[in-house]
Image (cartoon, rainbow, N blue to C red):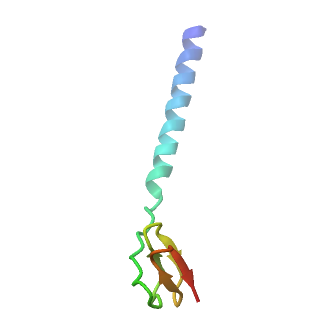
Amino acid sequence: MLKTFGIALLVAAMSVGLAEAKGAKAKAPPKALAYCQTDQPAKDTCACGPAKVTCPKGMWCHAFSSTCSP
């Protein structure tokens, strides 16, 4: 009986691991943002400064302070 329980537990663990592995492959990797032009309005969403702060379109990137302003 202990052997049967052990086999059932092993099979359940393997099926859960397989399901998690399939779920991980389905997700797309995050898209890398291009760097913003310093002290110019962003033409598209970009990464500002060394901290890579996300600047939305139309905001000004101040790279040394890693901030965006309207």
Q: Give the image location of residue 46, x and y in percent.
A: 45, 78
Residue drawn where x is 46% and y is 87% of the image:
42
How many numbered tags mark residues here?
Answer: 0
- Please identify the residue farthest to the front as the structure is shown: 64
**Could you say which is closer to the camera, residue 22 or residue 39?**
39
Name the image quarter holding the C terminus: bottom right
Above or below — where is 42 with respect to 28?
Answer: below
Give the left or right position of residue 27, taking residue 12 as reference: left
**Could you say which is closer to the camera, residue 43 or residue 8?**
43
Q: Give the image location of residue 30, x and y in percent.
A: 45, 65
Residue drawn where x is 57% and y is 85% of the image:
69
Residue drawn where x is 49% and y is 31% of the image:
14
Above or below — where is 11 with respect to 28?
Answer: above
**Could you say which is closer to the camera, residue 8 or residue 58?**
58
Q: Give the image location of residue 47, x and y in percent.
A: 45, 74
Name the image quarter holding the N terminus: top right
Above or below — where is 59 with respect to 8?
Answer: below
Q: Give the image location of residue 41, x and y in percent.
A: 47, 91
